[in-house]
């Protein structure tokens, strides 16, 4: 009888692992963490996750030389929605990307989405191999 009671708990134990290693979640790994252009950028800090798995997300940085942050958000949705990936904006700001002198400055805020955590953005940029050697300054 105790064995049957123990076996009844098995689905509760296995379920979190099955969710964690779902093939849907593997598609998040294929999304690049950083996409920004040279020069002056508006950027968004975005938490992405597959539909229904909000616990297992990933934070990405997207930036471009555009008129407003909504344009970046629209391009993010165009990129991610066909893959079944949802996006939640954590905030925005500006990045001055000087690739020639290997310097970056992260500052400002988005009128639409509010201010991003610039320190977190810097950490993500420094973890990306392209910007590993850059001197990145943050101004809040």
Image (cartoon, rainbow, N blue to C red):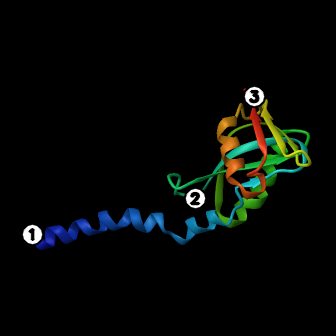
Residue in the picture at 78% in, 47% down: 73
Residue 30 or 77: which is nearer the viewer? 30
Numbered tag placed on residue 51 in the rendering: 2
Circle 3 is placed at which residue position? 139
Where's residue 135, x and y in %?
78, 41
Q: Residues within 10 Å of mark 3 (few under 14, many from 20)?
A: few
Secondary structure state at the residue bearing disc 1: helix
Secondary structure state at the residue bearing disc 3: loop
Q: Is residue 37 left or right of residue 93?
A: right
Where's residue 70, x and y in %?
81, 42
Q: Considering only vertical position in the picture, is 80 above or below 104?
A: below
Mark 2 or 1 closer to N-term?
A: 1
Where's residue 125, x and y in %?
72, 48
Mark 2 or 3 closer to N-term?
A: 2
Residue 120 or 129: which is nearer the viewer? 129
Where's residue 54, x and y in %?
53, 52
Residue 6 or 37: which is nearer the viewer? 37
Numbered tag placed on residue 35 in the rendering: none
Secondary structure state at the residue bearing disc 2: loop
Q: Considering only vertical position in the picture, is 7 above or below 66?
A: below
Residue in the picture at 73% in, 58% down: 129
* Real-space CA distance between mark 2 and mark 1, rounded to the nearest whole angstrom: 38 Å
* Real-space CA distance between mark 2 and mark 3, rounded to the nearest whole angstrom: 34 Å
Front tag of 2 and 1? 1
Residue in the picture at 65% in, 60% down: 85
Tell me which corner region of the image, top left, top right, bottom left or bottom right, holds residue 118: top right
Q: Is residue 102 left or right of residue 113?
A: right
Q: Considering only vertical position in the picture, is 132 above or below 69?
A: below
Which residue is the extreme one toward the left? 1
Circle 1 is placed at which residue position? 2
* Real-space CA distance between mark 3 and mark 1, rounded to the nearest whole angstrom: 61 Å
Residue 89 visible in rendering: no
């Amino acid at each position: 009888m105790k064995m049957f009671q123990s076996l009844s708990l098995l689905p509760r134990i296995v379920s979190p692992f099955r969710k964690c290693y779902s093939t849907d979640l593997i598609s998040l790994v294929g999304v690049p963490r950083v996409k920004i252009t040279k020069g002056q950028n508006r950027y968004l800090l975005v938490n992405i996750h597959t539909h229904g798995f909000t616990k297992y997300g990933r934070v990405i940085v997207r930036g471009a030389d555009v008129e407003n942050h909504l344009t970046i958000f629209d391009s993010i949705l165009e990129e991610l929605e066909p893959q079944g990936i949802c996006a939640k904006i954590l905030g925005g700001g500006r990045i001055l990307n000087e690739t020639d002198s290997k310097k970056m400055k992260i500052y400002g805020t988005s009128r639409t989405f509010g201010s991003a955590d610039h320190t977190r953005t810097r950490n993500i940029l420094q973890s990306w191999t392209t910007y590993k050697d850059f001197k990145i300054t943050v101004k809040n």
